Amino acid sequence: METALEHDTMEGVEEEKAETPEFSPLTQKGEASRVYAASLQRVGAQNAMRGTSGTEQSKREYRRLRVPQHRYTPLRENWETLLSPLVQHMKLQVRFNPKMRCVEMRTSPHTEDPGAIQKGCDFMAAFLLGFEVQDAIALLRLDDLYIDSFQVQDVKILHGDHLSRAIGRIAGQDGKTKFAIENATRTRIVLANTHVHILGSFQNIRIARDAICSLIMGAPPGKVYNHMRNVARRMKEQY
């Protein structure tokens, strides 16, 4: 019985050997070229499967802006006003992430302007710094507007009451000095504690910054007023 089983299994092995085709052995050079060709085909197939999805993902841009704690309430009150230019005109997707406490925006398939995401980011950053919505919208319409930020201590190291008096000289009584500088230089100024933010063109920002630095260094407001009048007259003559 055992010999019969062994005979049958031996016959099955011989039949399998007869059925399996025999290939000629590959040389090392031929095998390497075959593997290289297979890898090229695999990479080409992967690129074909990706198609346009890879290009769309490369075009998709994303920005995230952290919201300061003291700007939560203004952001909530003006949220719809802020969204309308970003969504309707710039064609961006915007949301507020309450977990990370930041504003997130990204481009969409409907976004036409390649610089829309950067303009929207500058617009939202200007509002978070303290500028009014009407002033910050100018960043979306005009290309030659910038924001310059510095601290009072960058101009002169002051402490205590001396620092408070310097900030008071910049603002003036009821904000008159700040308004005078804004109207003369066609800029917008935000005083946030010891931080000074200026919105305007490059040349106007330079003139306003020089006036503010003079006030920080201790120049009398009357002298700065006269200088601003001269600057305003020269700017009107230019335009």
Image: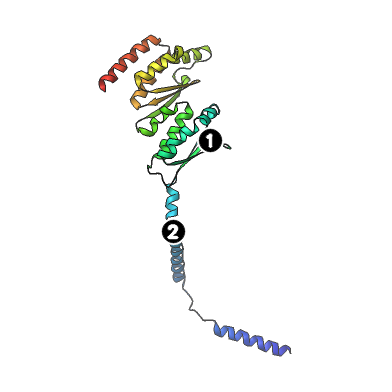
The answer to whether 125 is drawn above or below residue 196 in the figure is: below
Q: Is mark 2 on a helix, strand or loop?
A: helix
Q: Mark 2, residues whose alpha carbon is within 10 Å: few (<14), some, or many (≥20)?
A: few
Q: Is mark 1 on a helix, strand or loop?
A: strand
Q: Quadrant of residue 112?
A: top left
Alpha carbon of mark 2 to alpha carbon of mark 1: how far? 36 Å
Quarter the C terminus occupies? top left
Give the image location of residue 149, x and y in percent.
44, 25
Q: Give the tally of numbered discs.
A: 2
Q: Residue at coordinates 44% horizontally, 39% vertically from top-left?
A: 87
Q: Residue at coordinates 42% horizontally, 37% vertically from top-left?
A: 118
Residue 68 visible in the shown view: no
Q: Name the residue under label 2.
A: 47
Instruction: Please identify the residue farthest to the right as the structure is shown.
Output: 1
The answer to whether 24 is drawn above or below residue 119 in the figure is: below
Q: Quadrant of residue 198?
A: top left
Mark linked to residue 102: 1
- Disc 2 to disc 1: CB gap under 8 Å: no
Mark linked to residue 225: none
Observer-nearest residue: 155 or 95? 95
Three-letter residue code for mark 2: Asn
Give the image location of residue 193, x and y in percent.
50, 20
Residue 119 visible in the shown view: yes
Three-letter residue code for mark 1: Cys
Q: Mark 1, residues whose alpha carbon is within 10 Å: few (<14), some, or many (≥20)?
A: some
Q: Residue at coordinates 44% horizontally, 71% vertically from top-left?
A: 30
N-term-proximal mark, 2 vs 1: 2
